[in-house]
Each structure stands twice: as C-alpha cells, then as structure tokens.
Amino acid sequence: RRILRECVLRLLANPRTPQAVVGRGLSLPVPANVLKILVVEDDDLLRRMYEIRLATWKCRPIVRTAANGFDALVRIGMELPDLLITDLAMPNMDGFEMLRSLVRLAECSAMRIAVVTGLEPAEIERAGGLPPSVRVFGKPVPFAALEEIAESILETGPRFVAGGSQA
C-alpha cells in the first residue's frame, strides 16, 4: 500500500496531530508497557548502529536519538525516556553538562542512565565526575550489558535515583 507524500505532509501540518520531530519521523504516544530509550551520541554512524542493534532486542524498545546534550534535553522535555544512553564528549552541550541539568529535575529521578564513553576514568573525574547512580561503560558499545539494563527496567520498573538513592 502506498501513502502519498501530500498525505503525510497534511498529517504533519495538522495542529491536532500529536507530533514531535524525533529521529527520522513522527513521534506518536507510546503505550506505558513499552520501554522508551533515548540515545545521545554525536557520531552519526554510531547513532545509526544503536538504532539498528536496539531494534533487535527482545523487549522491542522505542528508540529516539539526539546528537548532543542540548538536543537530548529538548527530547526529554517532550517525552521522558525510561533509559538514557549517552556519550560524554559531544559538541555544543556535552554529556557532563546535560547530566548535571538532569540531576536537578525531579521528573527525571526514575530515569536510568548509562554512559558509553571513550574517556578514561581519570578524565571523567577531572571533568567533575558523574552521579553515583550512573552506570559507566567504555567503548566499544556493550550492547549485551545495555540490554540487561533495559530488561531489568521492564522487570522491576523504574527506580529512584535523585541524590544517588536507589530502590
């Protein structure tokens, strides 16, 4: 079945259409039992690799992407993810600044956060460190470990992470 381009443009132009410019298309409301993941990565190829690999996960998450911390904060404001996977070294707003902003927001306290970075632990500490609830992984991307985190969110639900407390 074919959909005419004009029909899609008309749908997007309708102010009553729930929409947000996310990834490659329209963002519609997501059912509560579906895992929502936001990947923040400045490398286009790596961002695409995340999309492809996460689409193969058994839990079938909804995956959104952002190219830097600022874009990620905008996307989080539109739809709070269950899991945030982020790099640290990015242009415009890096992962450190983004995470410092998120820690101050009570709305984000249940969101799980995983950092995947090429930075060494000493470099992370020199940049001010990370909140204790953040899981840190080195590159290459540890997809199996990230999938375990995703599955645990679905099994146990969100946890409280503000101020480093965990349920």
Image (tube, rainbow, N blue to C red):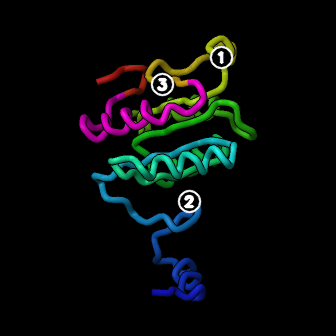
Q: Quadrant for residue 70, please give it.
A: top right
Disc 2, SS: strand
Q: Position of residue 49 (x, y in %)?
A: 58, 47
Task: Answer above or below: position of 12 versus 38.
Answer: below
Residue 10, quarter of the rendered image: bottom right
Report the residue marked by disc 2.
22
Q: CA distance from mark 2 to mark 1?
A: 31 Å
> Could you tell me which quadrant the N terminus lies in?
bottom left
What residue lies at 33% left-to-right and 52% top-to-bottom? 34
Q: CA distance from mark 2 to mark 3?
A: 24 Å
The residue identified by callout 3 is: 134
Which residue is found at the position 36% from the left and 33% from the top?
148
Q: Main secondary structure of the magenta part?
A: helix
Between 111 and 37, the one nearer to me in the picture: 37
In the image, which disc is placed on residue 120?
A: 1
Q: Residues within 10 Å of mark 1 (few under 14, many from 20)?
A: few
Q: Is residue 33 above or below residue 90?
A: below
Q: Position of residue 59 (x, y in %)?
A: 33, 48
How many C-alpha atoms fall within 10 Å of the one at disc 3: few (<14), some, or many (≥20)?
some
Going by the numbered disc 3, the residue's amino acid type is: Val
Quadrant, the C terminus:
top left
Q: Disc 1 residue type?
A: Glu
Q: Position of residue 115 (x, y in %)?
A: 54, 29
Q: Cα distance, mark 3 to mark 1?
A: 15 Å
Q: Amino acid at mark 2?
A: Val
Identify the magenta region.
Answer: 138-160
* Mark 2 or 1: the one toward you: 1
Characterize the local packing of mark 2: few (<14), some (14-19) or many (20 or more) Cα atoms within 10 angstroms.
some
Mark 1 lies on a secondary structure that is loop
